[in-house]
Structures are given as structure tokens and as C-alpha cells.
Amino acid sequence: MTLEMQDLARSVLRLAESSQQEVEVYAVKQRSLRVEVTDGKVETLREASQTGVGIRVIDRGRLGMAFTTRLDRESLKDAVQLAAANARSSAADEFNRLPSPKPVEPMDLMDPQLAEVPVDVKIEFAKKVEDAARGYDPRVTKVRQASYGDGVYEVGIANSRGVDVGYQGGYCSTSLMVVAEADGQAETGWTYDFSRTFADLDPVRVGREAAARAVEMLGAGSLATCRVPLILAPDVAAEFLEVLGPALTAEAVQKGKSIFAGKVGEMVGSKELTLIDSGLLPQGIATAPVDDEGVPSQDTIVLEQ
């Protein structure tokens, strides 16, 4: 089945015929919803939708880009010409190139419920998150930003080397911040969760977890500097890895901007650490059959032992 955005990407590619240039078209359509509740009342209810087309032109190693949300033929043609003009104005880079097509395994990333569940049910979901936090412990005195959000999207990618793919998906999420107070001390607790499916998102668990994080900090004190075993919560561990992320991109390595450049096969950290960049993680929020250039997703071992 060919998707609407895949057809759009193909049609824009046809506007960019040139024997001297490589052209890539990325078309995306997305709709999002966000609900925020405080004290059982809706404070924010926002729905948004957008369709856009991104175009990359590579002219003898020189890269130019353009983006438009106007989808009439003349606007799309103008965007193609702008990307080509931007390429002519840029410096050549031997690493600027487009991928060739490879077989792509389809993925089921869309939960029909995300579009079918009424908005008032999603508002009630956010209220349940807040109620669960308040009911956890009487020391929970304030609830801020009990929220629910979701989105559905469709992507189409085509390039002049023959890449021609499309896919669709969706996600939903919830988050909560609370304040717990006792003996003149106030502490905050925050948590979030996300899922590909509406049915798997649990408002009670999220509400109670945020409340527990606030309550368990009451009475906490400081420690003197010391060397001790440490257990990191997943979100905290992810922040440490986020520091490494930019240095592990292909661009940073190829241009010599990375501390890891030229160190393949060398020991760069603890042998206990293996880091995998997975585009195939089940239920992962960024999981997709291809990356944004149409290259099939895979599990890439970035650091091994």
C-alpha cells in the first residue's frame, strides 16, 4: 500500500529532474494533542496538525536544503529551486551523499485507538493521573502539570538514487509534577511515561510514582563527598549518555570533531559498558523501519565492552 506522503515525495522528486544533482525529498504529515489538568480542571487543550516537505539537493558534493508547508505545485517547485540555489552557494564536502535503496521490513507502529478515542476520554486520563498522585499520601499538597499527549504521523521519503519508502505511526505520553510538604520542608517529584498504544499507558502508576518520588525526599539530607556504589535511575543514566551522544555521530567522527575519532578498537571506558543505537527497539518512541534518509533501521553497536 502506497501512503499519501510517499506519493507526495515521489511527485516532488519528479519536479527536480537534473542529471547533475542528487535530490532527496522528505514529506511528513502529523497531528498532535496535548491536555494539561490542574485541580481537576482543564488548563490547556491544544490540537495541532502540519504537513511539510523537506528537500535536500547535492550538487557535486555541495549540499542545499529547503522546507515548505505550502503544497501547491508552484510552491513545491520554488522549494526545489531554492534547495538547488543553496547547494550552489555552499562548500563541497566529500561526505555529502545520498543512500541507495535497500529492502525495508514493514513495521506496525500505529494504534488505531489514538485517533478513535474521544478527546473527553483523554481529558479524563489526565485527571486520573492527578487523582492517583493526590490519593497516594496526604503530604502531597500540590499537583502541577498533570498532562496527556499523543500524536500520529505519516512519512514519505524518495531520492534520485531510487529510495522510495513510506510509513506511519503514533505514540502517546503522560507526565506529572507534584509537591509534597512536611515539617516546613517541600520537595518535588516528577515522572513521565510513553507508549505506542493507548491501552498500555497507566495513569495510576504514573501518578503514584511521581508522588512517591516527592514523598521519599522529605527529610533527606546532604552527604559529604565520598566514593560509594551508585545506582542510577534510567532517566538519570540517559542524561549521562546524552553527553556522549553528539561525539558519537558519524558527522562528528568524519570531520574530526569527536573525542572518539580514530579510536575504533581502542579502550575508551569501562569494559562493563556496551552502548547500542537501536532503531528496532520494540515499542521504542523513535523506532521506525528506516531512518530519515530511507536507510533501513538496525541495531548498531557503538561502544562494546
Image (spheres, helix red, strand yellow):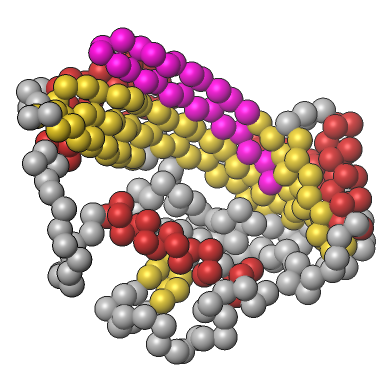
Report the side of 3 relative to 130 (left or right).
right
Q: Looking at the figure, which quarter contains the N terminus?
A: top right
Examine the rendering and report whether any part of residue 2 can be seen.
no
Please state the horizontal and vertical placement of residue 75, each as a whole percent of the image.
85, 32
Q: What secondary structure do most residues of the magenta stretch adopt?
A: strand
In reply to whether residue 40 is colored magenta, the answer given is yes
Q: Looking at the figure, which quarter contains the C terminus?
A: bottom left
Q: Which residue lies at the image location 75% right of the left edge and 67% below the top edge? A: 97
Q: Depth check: give the residue in front, 261 or 116.
A: 261
Q: Which residue lies at the image location 92% right of the left edge and 58% below the top edge? A: 88
Report the side of 54 relative to 302 (left or right).
right
Q: Which residue lies at the image location 45% right of the left edge and 52% below the top edge? A: 287
Report the side of 80 relative to 127 (left or right).
right
Q: Which residues are magenta?
A: 26-50
Asked if 255 appears above or below 38 in the picture, the reply is below
The furthest residue to the top: 41
The part of the image, by quadrant, that contains residue 116 is top left
Please state the horizontal and vertical placement of residue 155, each as a whole percent of the image.
60, 42
Q: Depth check: give the residue in front, 150 or 146.
A: 146
Please state the horizontal and vertical placement of residue 106, each as a whole percent of the image.
49, 52
Please state the horizontal and vertical placement of residue 193, each as a whole percent of the image.
30, 39
Examine the rendering and report whether any part of residue 143 can be seen.
yes
Asked if 151 appears above or below 106 in the picture, the reply is above
Q: Depth check: give the residue in front, 120 or 141.
A: 141
